[in-house]
Image (tube, helix red, strand yellow):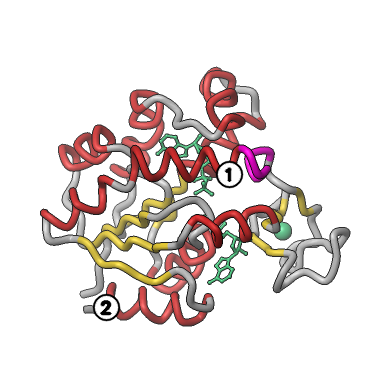
């Protein structure tokens, strides 16, 4: 029985979203990306979106209480298992999660700062379906459209160099402590995020099948 309650940890740009899409398709899990959920709230100009936008544009974390309220109900509905992508990001969030569910595996996708900056400055995302691309390997030009749906590709507001650096600092300070948190609980598996996407995927599937 493969892992059904899974968390992806890792710095911005490590490949969490890219891998999450492949893993949930293979294993039939519910993909819960707090970043995607927040960007949807911002686009719909909800009360939560209005509160979260400033933090996101600066590359800071949205306050724990808002995030926990947004995600807990959705986790409770994931009967066939879930993959949490971008949550938890602080020890307080991890403790809130632990009080509501057990986990089967935490996969930390690791990537050094220089490579994070390289990848995020060249990331493009489909406005319509959320597919993730990169100018350096799977897009022919700045004006290319989404392979999957023909949608317009855009550069995220927070994928600008100054904000990227801040996000990496925030990761090191607030999120990296979760590596030790989950190691102590016997749940942590690390994957080298520098590898090609297929190799990273194979490694994750090996971990989740074990
Ligand atoms: P995260 O969700 O962790 O922020 P993404 O999945 O959005 O990361 O990936 C960040 C960028 O790096 C995207 O442009 C993506 O196309 C690219 N990318 C993802 N995985 C790899 C990989 N293994 N090697 C090179 N580039 C990758
Ligand atoms: P990344 O590509 O950096 O992994 P995400 O799409 O996961 O980006 O997150 C984008 C932004 O949304 C973060 O910089 C932060 O402002 C906010 N965010 C996402 N998840 C969380 C969380 N669990 N806690 C606090 N803020 C979050
Ligand atoms: Zn698309």
Quarter that holds the C terminus:
bottom left
Q: State yes or no: Cβ of the residue under disc 2 lies below 8 Å from any atom of ligand 1.
A: no
Q: Position of residue 168 (x, y in %)?
A: 48, 45
Q: Position of residue 58 (x, y in %)?
A: 58, 30
Q: Which residue is mark 2?
A: 209
Q: State yes or no: Cβ of the residue under disc 1 lies below 8 Å from any atom of ligand 2.
A: no
Q: Earlier in the sequence, mark 1 or mark 2?
A: 1
Gap between marks 1 and 2 measured at Cα:
33 Å
Q: At 85% from the left edge and 59% from the top edge, which residue is drawn?
A: 142
Find the magenta span and give its range.
157-162
Q: At 30% from the left edge and 67% from the top edge, which residue is drawn?
A: 190
Task: Mark 2: give few (<14), some (14-19) or many (20+) Cα within 10 Å.
Answer: few
Rendered position, 98 above or below 53: below
Query: Is 26 on the left or on the right of 2, as rendered?
Result: right
Task: Mark 1: give few (<14), some (14-19) or many (20+) Cα within 10 Å.
Answer: many
Residue 9 magenta-highlighted: no
Q: Which residue is mark 1?
A: 164
Quarter that holds the N terminus:
bottom left
Q: At 50% from the left edge and 62% from the top edge, which residue is drawn?
A: 15
Query: Is 44 on the left or on the right of 113, as rendered?
Result: right
> Foreground residue, 202 or 159?
159
Query: Judging from the image, what secondary structure is the residue with disc 2 in?
Result: helix
Rendered position, 189 above or below 129: below
Looking at the rendered image, the disc whose residue lies closer to the viewer, 1 or 2, is 1
Q: Position of residue 42 (x, y in %)?
A: 61, 29
The residue at the far front in this view is 114
Q: At 46% from the left edge and 81% from the top edge, which residue is drawn?
A: 199
Query: Judging from the image, what secondary structure is the residue with disc 1 in?
Result: helix
Query: Is 120 on the left or on the right of 155, as rendered?
Result: left
């Amino acid at each position: 029985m493969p892992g059904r309650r899974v968390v992806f940890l890792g710095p911005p740009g490590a490949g969490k979203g890219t891998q999450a899409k492949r893993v949930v398709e293979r294993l039939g899990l519910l993909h819960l990306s707090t970043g995607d959920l927040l960007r949807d709230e911002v686009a719909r100009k909800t009360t939560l979106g209005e509160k979260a936008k400033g933090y996101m544009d600066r590359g800071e974390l949205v306050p724990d209480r808002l995030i926990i309220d947004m995600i807990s109900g959705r986790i409770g509905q994931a009967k066939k298992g879930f993959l949490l992508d971008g949550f938890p990001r602080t020890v307080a969030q991890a403790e809130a999660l632990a009080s509501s569910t057990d986990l089967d595996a935490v996969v930390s996708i690791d990537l050094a700062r220089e490579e994070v900056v390289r990848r995020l400055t060249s990331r493009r995302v489909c406005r319509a379906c959320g597919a993730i691309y990169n100018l350096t390997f799977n897009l022919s030009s700045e004006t290319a459209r989404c392979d999957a749906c023909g949608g317009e590709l855009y550069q995220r507001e927070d994928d600008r160099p100054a904000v990227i650096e801040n996000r990496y600092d925030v990761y090191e300070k607030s999120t990296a402590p979760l590596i030790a948190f989950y190691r102590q609980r016997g749940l942590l598996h690390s994957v080298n995020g520098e590898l090609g996407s297929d190799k990273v995927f194979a490694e994750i599937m090996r971990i989740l099948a074990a």
